[in-house]
Image (cartoon, grey):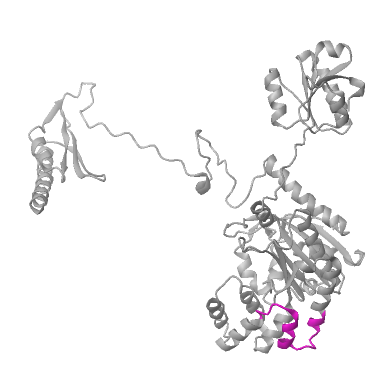
Amino acid sequence: KKKRTQQGTRTKLAGVVLGWLVCSRVARSTTTRSFSLHHYSSPTTSCWRNSFFWRTTTTFTYTVVPFPFCRTHPTHYLAQKHYTRIMEVPPSSETPPTQPKPKPAAKQARPSAKGAGQKKGKGNYKISLEPIAGVRDFPPEEMALRSWLFGHWREVARRFGFEEYDAPLLEYEELYKIKAGQSFEELSQQMYAFTDRGDQAVTLRPEMTPSLARMILHKGKALLLPAKWFSIPQCWRFEECTRGRKREHYQWNMDVIGVESISAEAELLAAIVCFFKRVGLTEKDIQIKFSSRQVVQSVLEKFGVVGEKFAPTCIIVDKLDKLEKADVLAQLKALNIDEEAGNGIISALSVKNVTELGTIIGEAHPVLAELTKLVELGTAYGIKDWLRFDASVVRGLAYYTGLVFEAFECSGALPRAVCGGGRYDKLFSTYGGQDHPCCGFGFGDIVILEVLKDRKLLPKLPTLVNDVVIPLGEELRPAAIQVATKLREAGRSVDIILSKKKMQQAYSFADRVGAERVLLVAPTEWEKGLVRVKYMRASASRQEAAEKDASTNEQDVPFADLI
């Protein structure tokens, strides 16, 4: 084996030297020349090939036929060297110099739809067929599901006496800078912010609460308090996309303005549970953890965490359920909080019942009475089993001043909160206005849809098309339009075949859209004032089922009686 390797090396070197000698020999008799050395690799062989091409300024073109030097086949060179020759081709000839036929370029693979936004399959599209990374399209089937979810949100808000509002998607960047305070640097990395043509610093809204505050301040004393407002805005944050998180989402917001009592939070929690029940979830699926920023403040003050350290510490301890204890201690140490104090903070915020909390912050602390009252109100609302005290619930946002809460999926399959909120009584003064007691929550659409999907609770939404009208000939299209118009005025959803189709195609279309009935406008029947009705679905009423022909599933109905 060693001998063969040495022989191959010698042969390879001899071939390279010979190639250069041929190059220099021919070059002496030419005025222009070019030389290239190509390296080819494969799982079984690696070889070099010399290609030479010279063009003289006189009467001949010389081409050296390329030959390989293969280190895996040294005898190949020994055989080829005897057949290498220089060919002469007159310049007047239209035949091009003999050169190796280039290998066809390998067809480049199209970028994957996931990675580069290109649709897989045939077609040379000039645009990306996928939406921008992190955002969603809503074709009809997805839009139907979104409308179903929004419908539940709106119905719950209506039942609890909330009014709907909206605000522009584009907002002043300063609105979020003031609200975020010290944490704005982190928030700014997630914002879709830019300077518009009016030289204003604007952004796509990352959340709705600042817009709500701006609108409330704008109304001033004209606002009737208490106010109960809700909205379903689309919010934008440039974040890493994971399951349950994208760069845009819709969020159900409900806020109560002007109520100091804990009864406002209890009302919001009851609304959240009402929604969960409507979509088929139980307290075994979802739990709502609650605590208070006053609990956190008391615990941190006990260990000397006050002033400027308070807000960043809240952000750290809010991750107790997501990070290892060592990681939390390391982050606290970075804030100059020693290990003993860090362990004490972690231990105190691991309390899971209100009674035990009293031994840490004192039985006379007013927050204990507030939390106890919330449990009593939860019992009255019938939602006590959905509520669980957890002192580690902090909510990282610095503007919370009282009760805070988050809903989590119990199995742990989705570590992100389903929804969350709390009390924020000091927000308006940060914008220079008069403070009002406020509380509210945000409830995103992405996580809850994942929860429902995991539990197979997403509905099979019924079709929106009741009837399909088919004219048997273009001359009957005006009559078909009359039929469709009459049914639409009666409140039915009606589609009409707009182009000429074979009967089989028309019936296939009606079946695909899930129509309950097909109405045929035929010449003979229409002359008699009749329309042929064919029942496609079992959802027709019992009266219709009794009247229709059982053998053919069809009946002729007078135009005047169509409903």
From this viewpoint, is residue 518 visible? yes
Residue 275 drawn in magenta: no
Q: Position of residue 161 (x, y in %)?
A: 88, 59
Q: Position of residue 50 (x, y in %)?
A: 18, 41
Camera-side residue of 425 and 286: 286
Whether residue 241 sits left or right of residue 93 in the image: it is right
Camera-side residue of 172 and 296: 296
- Residue drawn at x 57%, y 43% as measured from the top left: 130
- Residue drawn at x 8%, y 39% as measured from the top left: 78
Camera-side residue of 435 and 504: 504
- Residue drawn at x 81%, y 84% as measured from the top left: 366
- Residue 21 sits above or below residue 124 on the image: below
Whether residue 316 sits left or right of residue 459 in the image: it is left
Q: Position of residue 524 (x, y in %)?
A: 83, 10
- Residue drawn at x 72%, y 88% as measured from the top left: 359
Residue 358 drawn in magenta: yes
Q: Position of residue 37 (x, y in %)?
A: 21, 44
The magenta-colored residue range is: 349-369
- Residue 516 sits above or below residue 208 on the image: above
